[in-house]
Image: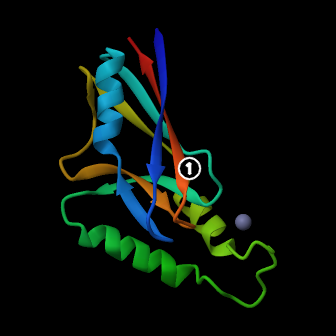
């Protein structure tokens, strides 16, 4: 059993956006030389997330962000967090801060239309994504 861990740096440009990091994750897997096992993609931030969804039609990303915006308004009577970014914290918890992807014969087991996304909810900022490859 081997473990390889690397960090990806991401500079986001908007308050809310989804950045496709599939190729970067696949690159870390390839460099690791690990063929079978699993990959954990994790972001150590409270106002960001990691998700897997369609990366063919970019309108899907647009619609996900639009829906999160409708579900979790930026300003709402009753928010108490003094930093003023409560919506970003709620979106982070809804989306989650990690995903685990299976690894088979050196390849990420993703569906044809699936990509791995870093989700920014309080940008623009410099962010980190930690990728851990575990297997043999
Ligand atoms: Zn905050």
Q: Residue furthest bottom?
A: 77
- From the viewer's side, name the closer residue of 80 and 52: 80
Quarter holding the C terminus is top left
Q: Secondary structure at mark 1?
A: loop
Residue 112 appears left or right of 91: left
- From this view, report whether residue 105 is shown above or below residue 89: above
Residue 82, given in percent of the width and then of the height, sits at 81, 75
Circle 1 residues within 10 Å: few <14, some 14–19, many ≥20: many
**Where is 76 relative to 123, above or below?**
below
Measuring from the top left, give residue 17's x and y in whole percent: 42, 66
At 24% from the left edge and 67% from the top edge, which residue is drawn?
58
Q: x, y percentage for residue 57?
A: 19, 66
Q: Quadrant of residue 54?
A: bottom left
Left or right side of 50 for 58: left
- For image coordinates 50% across by 62% down, the residue present is 120
Residue 132 located left or right of residue 59: right
Ligand 1 quadrant in view: bottom right
Q: CB of residue at label 1: within 8 Å of ligand 1? A: no
The picture quadrant where one finds residue 72 is bottom right
The residue at which mark 1 appears reads as 97
Residue 19 lies, with reference to residue 38, above or below; the image says below
Q: Kindly identify the residue that appears in the image at 52 percent across and 59 percent down.
A: 95
Image spot of residue 114 (x, y percent): 26, 50
Question: Which residue is depicted at the point 35% across and 46% down?
Answer: 21
């Amino acid at each position: 059993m081997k473990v390889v861990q690397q960090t990806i740096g991401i500079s986001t440009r908007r308050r809310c956006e989804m950045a496709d990091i599939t190729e970067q994750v696949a690159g870390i897997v390839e460099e690791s030389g690990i063929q079978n096992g699993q990959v954990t993609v994790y972001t150590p931030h409270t106002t960001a997330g990691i998700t897997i969804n369609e990366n063919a039609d970019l309108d899907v990303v647009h619609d996900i962000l639009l829906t999160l915006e409708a579900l979790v308004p930026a300003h709402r009577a009753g928010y108490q967090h003094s930093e003023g970014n409560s919506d970003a914290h709620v979106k982070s918890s809804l989306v989650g801060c990690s995903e685990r992807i299976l690894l088979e014969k050196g390849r990420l087991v993703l569906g044809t239309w699936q990509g791995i996304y870093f989700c920014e909810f309080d940008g623009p900022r410099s962010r980190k994504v930690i990728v851990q490859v575990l297997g043999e």
